[in-house]
Amino acid sequence: MIARIGTRAGLIAAAAALAWAAAAPAREAAAEPAAYAWRNVRVGAGGFAPNIVFSPAERGLAYLRTDMGGAYRWDRAVGRWIPLQDGNAVSSYMGVESVAPDPTDPNKVYLAAGMGHWGEAAIWRSADRGATWDVVPVPFRMGGNEDGRGLGERLAVDPHRPSTLLFGSRHDGLWRSEDSGRSWARVTRFPHQGLGLPAGRRETHGGVSFVVFDPASRSVFAGVADPGAAAVYRSDDGGGSWRRLPGGPPPAMLPVKADVAHGRLYLACSTGIGPNGIAAGSVWRLDLAGERWTDITPDRSPTAEGGYMGVSADRNRPGRVAVSSVDRWHPGDTVWLSDDDGAKWANLRERSRRDVSAAPWLRWGHEEAEFGHWTAGLAIDPFDGGTIAYTTGATVYRTDEGERRSGTMLWRPWVSGIEQTAVITLISPTGGAPLVSGFGDLAGFVHDDLDVAPATMHLVPRLTNTNNLDYAGRKPNVIVRSGTLHAEQPQSGASLGYSEDGGRSWHAVRVPPIAVRGQAPQRYDLRGEAPINVSADGATFIVGTPIVMVTHDRGQSWAAAAGLPLGARAIADKVDPRLFYAIDVDGGRIFVSRDGGRSFAPATARGLPRDLTPARMRGREDQWPMVAEFGRAGALWFNLGGRLWRSDDAGESFRAFADADLVVDEFGLGKAESGSAHPALYAIGTKAGVRGIWRSLDGGGHWTRINDDAHQWGLRFRAVSGDPRHFGRVYVATDGRGIVWGEPSAD
């Protein structure tokens, strides 16, 4: 059975009998959304895009698949990428395993969508370039965000019979559809039937790594990238019968990606499926007529590291082919180009220049941006051999100078409209930039202008992830952050930092070794699990190491916060610099400090349930359940197991608010509506079976949904905050679609 998803109309309707449809909102239960306008905070790509595919049916039409942010279509008329799955409510579908534009009809396109073997998997079918979709759940699993996501396109449309599709699965062999993806059957005559589902959540298989049709014949080729079964297979009857091609790459070389043109099959091989852990690789050419293999590996030096993954043949010039390296960390990944079928190669990295003004943070604090890493995707425009694009772990690059025989070749980020990052946390301070973010992999940014890509990320200390941020309520230029150390940082480094200029420059903070339960002293601030908060006046930092530590002099000296049990975490009041609050989940107590964090005592906390364990954080990247109000001293909001509680007297008493039907996952505060005594509340939560983004203007008494069915982003939400200076504005951190922000619509 098929579900219909419209990215423009925002329609998600499914037959009630479909079990997977339970993840989609039930129409009769949905509250009428408030009119909100939504868009992305601009960064410019930022995450791993495993491949880019040009349509062979129309000039200027291309598709990009990402590993957790859905698929995009390049719209040449408007000059930007259009996200195609924002109306989707199923998290797993945001990991795209493969994309296949119909080679005969530019309006038709197919997606193989499924984040991992543990989640839902479906074939998405569109007859209008992704404006609307039919979603067909399938019996085989996918791995759009698993290892091997940079392998070749597994989904392919027969150019001679476009209603026939083949899909190479990771675990269950080759599958075939004769009705444009409506139904699927296993190809029992394909020699490799797969290894079955892996036992562990983080385990996977390469499986059938690519399927490519020869547009000039009835031949189709499929690769298998499972160790011990690595092979390339050929069918000359459109995929009915198959045989293994003899010769070619040695068994250690897994066939990972291929392209066919002008009577040649070009094959990229690696010793692993990537995107990490590839030690070596090779490139091969197969002359189809005589089935003769030739090793055309660009770099044969004994010190060459990494493998090859991207491969693309020029449809207009026989013998012209490009390949990309992967995991070539020294001296760095590159794209190789040959005009003579691989007899000679030009290293484009050596003659390339990158203009990253569209995403200047790509310099990573250096004078020039790197050529890229994880360069799994590569494509030559089938209508214009001068246009070449490749994907990296952080962006998509494009050049229109690919046919230049000499001189510098200019590449630019091809990212307008793409926001594909995993955002962990964010804050909207009461002064300075409207937004400061904490990202996965990219550390995070100061967003002075929400429509302009930041110049740089947080660099000192250099962290892969920023897990928490806080600002001083009365001095918002003082910001603190904590995160996960970058692999290149020595263990004597720092995972904490502070800024005195609104996040534009940073200084490292180090907590000295402490002894816990009689063990030898050690540093507990190097594991990414030590959140940091700052007092309202910016003078005091408090760090959530097992023994809470406090500094009043920017880390020059430290003292343990007296009166707190092990494992408590403290936050600061946003108005009174003397006030700090802490939660002891195991002991069921709220603590308060009235002397700047030096000592804490239990608060009465009248009205709160005695069991506080529902407030336990699942991991270091979760939003903290207690938030101090930015406009009033002693005002606290507390999420206890999905229900909000409020204290107006620094934790001495709490009361729950009326609308208990909303189960709150994350929440944040924003500027109050004119005349209201309550800040605007924004929440990620579920009400009457509808999960979404909600707003309350009466202190939690009533909630209104403010996103709609066209703006769901896979419901992959990590954090939310209102803006203390702009009524109605809200920022939402998504896990794969960057930061989205909304304001009440003028319509």
Image (spheres, helix red, strand yellow):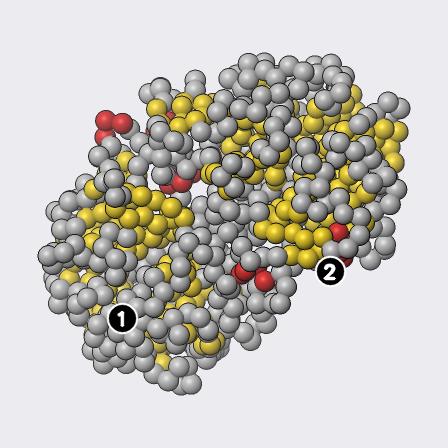
Whether residue 486 can be seen here: yes
**Structural distance between the alpha carbons of marks 1 and 2:** 45 Å
Estimate the x, y position of residue 374 in percent, counting from the top left: 64, 50
Residue at screen point 19% across, 44% down: 703
Q: Nearer the viewer, residue 636 or 549?
A: 636
Instruction: Tell me: residue 79, above or below residue 101.
Output: below
Determine the secondary structure under disc 2. loop
| Amino acid type shown at disc 2 | His
The answer to whether 200 appears left or right of 268 in the picture is: left
Q: Position of residue 722 (x, y in %)?
A: 28, 55
State whether residue 466 is above or below residue 575. Answer: above
Label 2: which residue? Answer: 330
Query: How far from the left and from the top, in percent, is residue 173?
Result: 64, 26
Few, some or many residues within 10 Å of mark 1 (<14, 14–19, 20+): many
- Image quadrant where one finds the N terminus: top left
Decide: few, some or many residues near mark 2? Use Cα within 10 Å; few <14, some 14-19, many ≥20. Answer: few
Q: As rendered, which of 102 and 234 lies closer to the eye? A: 102
Is the residue under label 2 in contact with that under label 1 (CB below 8 Å)?
Answer: no
